[in-house]
Image: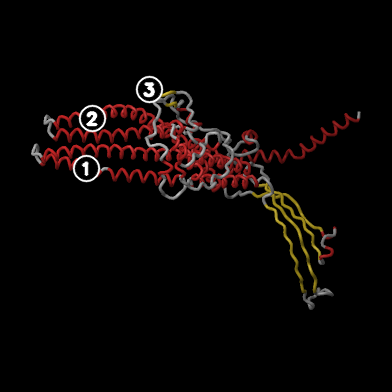
Amino acid sequence: MRTHFQLSDRRNLREGYFRKYLPFMEIMLLLVTAAGCTSGREYFRNGFKVGPNYTKPAAPVADDWVDSSDPNVEKIRPDDAAWWRTFNDPTLDDLIHQAYQQNLTLRVAGLRILEARAQRDIAAGGLFPQSQQAYGSYSRTNLSRNAPTAAPSSFFDEWKLGTNLAWELDFWGRFRRAVESANANLDASVENYDDVLVILLAEVAQQYASLRTAEQRLEYAKQNAEIQRESLGIADAKYQNGATSKLDVTQGQANLSQTLAAIPPMETARRQAANQLCILMGMPPQNIDAMLSRTKMIPTAPPHVAVGVPAELLRRRPDVRRAERQVAAQSAQIGIAQSELYPHFSITGNIYVDSKSVQNLFESGSVAGSIGPSFQWNILNYGRIVNGVRVQDARFQQLVVTYQNTVLQANAEAENAMVAFLKAQQQVKDLADSAEASKQSVGLVRDQYNAGKADFNRVLTVEQQLTVQQDQLANAQGSVAKNLVLLYKALGGGWQIRLGGTEPQPLPAPNGAPRPAQPDMAPTIPEPPTNT
């Protein structure tokens, strides 16, 4: 029986509260429906928040690659977390490690994550009382003795110590939307770090390929200069013996000088690539030949490459994910702007002790205070507030289009790198055949010239062809490596290095040479975003 009465009492109590606050709830629903852009149904569905709930926008993605039918293109999911190991070049592995540990641009991106995380925590603090203050004061007052109400004693002390707070309730979800926006911005900063990392690793590999290409071109140029020097010696000997005119000697000298003149620009290109590698590794330009002596050839790319399907770019490329997170952050800003259309409800209060003597300051009779609700409603600013909502919505639409354009650009970059890689491989094969044939022709035409069966013009033509074709071959071999790097960059590979397990281990410096200092500059960053 007692239980029955208890249940009844509770039910009556709930109904009493419901009847008591029903008018207030009806007024709030009326405000939601009439004063703003969010209906009552949407307000409840959004978790008592005004403004739109974010949904990921659609993006145009190709169904397949243009070169998907090429036998060297594999549509399996690429294992590009440590794509630089594809080249099997320990020097490149070492440079990648140095750049990841020491690059200053990457460090700036990491510090931006720390900034975004602090901004997120600031936004989360808005869910709690926004203003809390402690105060205290002491004053000694002297009253006029000639006043009509003069007290017997004109001097008195006043001691006061207290605290106050103001708490705006998150009735419309303004502060929760701010947390949503800050969380999305934090995700975007992590994606920006990953994007900078992808660009950094690709730039290191590109500069390394440029350096090795310059070295190969130098090697070919020096070899051809030696060949031409030998031909010049033959022509000069024949001229001294009266077997030919001086024209052969001057032509041979001109050909040799032209080849030698091409060497300084190649040496400059190599030095500039080495200097850029130093900058990428976070150290001043210096001689890094000791670090580069492990290998002496252009990185060799495999003939086949796994590229997956275009739709995977939405997940794999950090810049695409960053653009999507920026859209999400802006979506929450619409709700924040819409919340200004409604009244803001707050609770303010203070409690303090006040006494004329410090001995009685903490007695119960010295306690005073107040507490109560309040509201503020900008009822005459709707033109500005509504247009503020429109501003945020327009920015949201801009970011949606930017995200869609980022997806298109990502697809185009992958397609461009893929076709460049495939065509460069064909070019290398043809140039290698051409250079080998020219090399054999040089030996044959020199024998004919010695035997008097060919003039020196033919010798010059074949030697010039060999010089040009070998230089083109070196450039084409470098292009294969560079285009494969660009393809991995376009596919968004390499950022996984920060997750651990793919970071190359530092290799010992060759010949006991001291290695540049490696300060620990990689900042601690949050876990990857949930949409990764």
From mark 1 to mark 3, how far is it between C-alphas? 41 Å
Q: Amino acid at mark 2?
A: Ser
Q: Amino acid at mark 3?
A: Asp
Tag 1 residue: 258
Can you give x and y, in whole percent of width and height, for residue 499 in the image? 56, 36
The earlier-in-sequence mark between 3 and 2 is 3
Above or below, 107 against 445 in this view is below
The earlier-in-sequence mark between 1 and 2 is 1
Taking the spot 38% from the left edge, 22% from the top edge, the residue there is 70
Which residue occupies the foreground of this view, 278 or 462? 462
Is label 1 or label 3 in front? Answer: 1
From mark 1 to mark 2, how far is it between C-alphas? 19 Å
Above or below, 160 against 149 in this view is above
Query: 305 left or right of 466?
Result: right
Tag 2 residue: 438
Tag 3 residue: 70
